[in-house]
């Protein structure tokens, strides 16, 4: 038994939504010191495309958390790579590929708040609704899906399919 990929969101549509979100961010952060903090590795293409569409002098940084597991408790334990830019007094937008249970984004938001950021917002490529456990406010969101496992445009399945330009849903065959 294997999986086949079915296209769900073509790259043209991704590009359109990225531009729309970038424009919202530009209006919201004009004149402010903005740092985009991406959660590795799923965020890379989304963050790279988004950052280049925002005509402000923004900074970018990244952190990494150990993926999937039990309840994440804010602290160092699940953080495998920290940000390097001091975030004290900065306006931060956390950039994530997909929100599923909400554990990861909640955890990262706590970490960033604890670094003394002036404001912390979230920007996600995909809001996947079915399995949400932790409420987390999504300030900017490109797409909503009900359920399913997605790959492409940064999203992987065991490190496979991450670099595809479109987003696919995996279907059992
Ligand atoms: P959460 O902590 O349950 O919200 O999980 C978020 C993380 O799980 C994301 O950063 C992804 O790495 C991974 N993930 C959840 N759903 C998918 C999916 O459909 N495709 C690829 N990765 C996923
Ligand atoms: Mg991820």
Image (tube, rainbow, N blue to C red):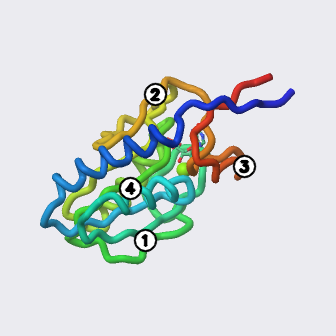
* Disc 1 residue crowd, few under 14, some 14–19, many 20+, Cα 10 Å: some
Judging by the rendered image, the residue that carries numbered circle 2 is: 129
Contact between marks 1 and 2 (CB within 8 A): the answer is no
- Between the C-alphas of marks 3 and 2, the distance is 23 Å
Quadrant of the picture in which ligand 1 is shown? top right
First in sequence: mark 2 or mark 4? Answer: 4
> Whole-Å distance between the Cαs marked 2 and 4?
23 Å
Identify the residue position indicated by label 3 in the image: 160
Instruction: Count neighbours of disc 2 (C-alpha within 10 A) and say few if under 14, some if 14 to 19, many if 20 or more.
Output: some
Alpha carbon of mark 1 to alpha carbon of mark 3: how far?
26 Å
Which of the numbered marks, if any, corresponds to residue 50? 4
Q: Residue at x 31, y 57 (%)?
A: 93
In the drawing, does residue 8 fall left or right of residue 19? right
3 vs 2, front mark? 3
Asked whether mark 4 and ligand 2 are closer than 8 Å, the reply comes as: no
The residue under label 1 is 83
């Amino acid at each position: 038994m294997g999986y086949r990929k079915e296209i769900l969101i073509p790259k043209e549509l991704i590009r359109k939504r990225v531009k729309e979100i970038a424009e919202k961010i530009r209006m919201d952060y004009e004149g402010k010191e903005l740092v985009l903090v991406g959660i590795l590795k799923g965020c890379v293409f989304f963050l790279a495309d988004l950052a280049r569409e925002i005509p402000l002098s923004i900074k970018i940084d990244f952190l990494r958390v150990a993926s999937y597991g039990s309840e994440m408790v804010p602290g160092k334990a699940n953080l495998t790579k920290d940000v390097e830019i001091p975030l004290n007094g900065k306006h931060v937008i956390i950039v994530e590929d997909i929100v599923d249970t909400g554990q990861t984004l909640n955890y990262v938001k706590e970490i960033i708040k604890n670094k003394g950021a002036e404001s912390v917002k979230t920007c996600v490529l995909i809001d996947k609704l079915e399995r949400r456990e932790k409420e987390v406010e999504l300030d900017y969101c490109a797409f909503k899906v009900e359920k399913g496992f997605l790959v492409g445009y940064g999203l992987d399945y065991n490190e496979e399919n991450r670099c595809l330009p479109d987003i696919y849903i995996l279907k059992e065959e």
